[in-house]
Image (spheres, grey):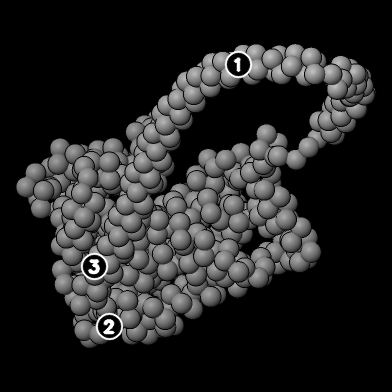
Amino acid sequence: MALATSGNVVLGSLAFAIFWVLAVFPAVPFLPIGRTAGSLLGAMLMVIFQIITPNQAYAAIDLPILGLLFGTMLVSVYLERADMFKYLGKLLSWKSKGAKDLIFRICLISAISSALFTNDTSCVVLTEFVLKIARQHNLPPHPFLLALASSANIGSSVTPIGNPQNLVIAVQSKISFGNFLIGILPAMLLGVFANSLILICMYWRLLSIPKDEEDAAIEVVAEEDLNSHRFSPATMSHFTSSSSQEWKSTMEAINVQSPPDINRSMGHVETIRNRLTPSENDIHSVHSDMLESARNSNASKEVANDASSQKREETTTSHNAASVERLRDALSVQSSEGKEDLTLRWRRMWKSCVYLVTIGMLIALLMGLNMSWTAITAALALVVLDFKDARPCLAKVSYLLLIFFCGMFITVDGFNKTGIPSTLWDLMEPYAQIDRVSGIAVLAIIILILSNLASNVPTVLLLGGRVAASAATISAADEKKAWLILAWVSTIAGNLSLLGSAANLIVCEQARQADPHLGYTLSFWSHLKFGVPSTLIVTAVGLALIR
């Protein structure tokens, strides 16, 4: 494609430069409007400068990519509600055998979850788990944060739904989900292994904590958790020392006061014995006195019986009322427990449905069905199964990212119409043929540089069609290989620096904003120290395995 007029070249380059600056540096001091607004500004300038027409701008928006991106984001929202990532977090520390084992485990789980649920989502939900694990093992968190972010990027390269640039490649290349997976899977597995080895070698001393120190750290954490659930002294039924002293003093008082009472009773008995004589008059007198006292006693007993029966009736009535109240309380407790049990059963069934729908979506993608409509169908199936107002879940979808893509499609299409990308590719194409090793190396270097300068998605949009067309002149197999190389290198390029991918920035921000006792700031230079060797080695390892 020949260069456009000089005016269009200058204006188109200016619009693309504004988009690039705001995409790479969203908080630039002279125009801190952010990435999304920057992409819309670039698109608007392309139309205002008449680089493209309004109809061409609308046509540049790739709806299948937006549909696939929307569907996968909504499915990830429901998976998070179904505790999928909570279970993944538990796997990180389940039967762990030390710090180095944790590095391997974080790398593997991060890679797998990113391949299935996108790298950004995995980094958002797993960062806090990684920080907690590092604290439990009394280890510095930055090796584990680097393992999470870098392996998320590596793992996301294996599927079309792993990251945005793969979505673009899958839609434009028409490569099926299964062929995409098979083509990059060996490179991804060996890349994750190499990445974990690099981390262990670089941070060997930090990760080599003696076992007894590690166990002591875990015991401290366990003791802290136990202290937060101490028993309340009010619930204990044992005697305290003060109560036992009171009991002893009471018993002593009873022992001191009892002899006078006993002596008084004995004297009364002796008086009765002295009054009793064998005379007949006394016997008659005593007999009459006993009859009179018996009558008085019977009368008093009748009164006492009436009072006691009335009291017994009142006690029975109050006892029955208390029994009815207790029965009501028991029925209400049983009803609430039944409702909780029903809610728990429904939630378990709903979670199982979420997992089944997700597995069905993956099977449909492997069968070669339309990826965009498959993802949207799975997302809407989860909305219906939830049987609730879907607005809270829909609100969690990143519509800013969708708008950013719309503006970026228009801006990149306008920049392509200036002829600058085609002219530059014509100069590099003879040295970037993928039928020889040197050509693959040159192409990989070009993709690495552009992905870190212009970001990976614009790089794919600018180079994708040209690289594939050049490879198609060799063979159809080489065309597919060219697309897979572009997917692999543009994704791994994100590990080069902290600003190379959104996943790196997400891990950095999540770690910085965590709880004070967990928070950690991942610096640009500490990431670069690891990112450069890891990116170069993992890229080279993967290129040797992509077919």
Side (left or right) of 111 relative to 132: left
Residue type indicated by callout 1? Arg
Residue lying at 65% horizontally and 70% vertically, measured from the top left: 97
Q: Residues within 10 Å of mark 1 (few under 14, many from 20)?
A: few
Instruction: Of the two numbered discs 2 and 3 on the same chain, state the one appearing first in sequence.
Output: 3
Which residue is at the far front? 280
Q: Residues within 10 Å of mark 2 (few under 14, many from 20)?
A: some
Side (left or right) of 341 relative to 204: left
Nearest to the eye among marks 2 and 1: give it: 1
The quadrant in which residue 239 appears is top right
Instruction: Of the two numbered discs 2 and 1 on the same chain, state the one appearing first in sequence.
Output: 1
Task: Residue 389: give x, y in percent of width and height.
Answer: 21, 42
Nearest to the eye among marks 3 and 1: give it: 1
Q: Is residue 73 above or below residue 97?
A: above
Residue lying at 20% horizontally and 72% vertically, measured from the top left: 364
Task: Residue 515: give x, y in percent of width and height.
Answer: 57, 40
| Residue at which label 2 appears | 478
Instruction: Of the two numbered discs 3 and 1 on the same chain, state the one appearing first in sequence.
Output: 1
| Residue at which label 1 appears | 295
| Residue at which label 3 appears | 361
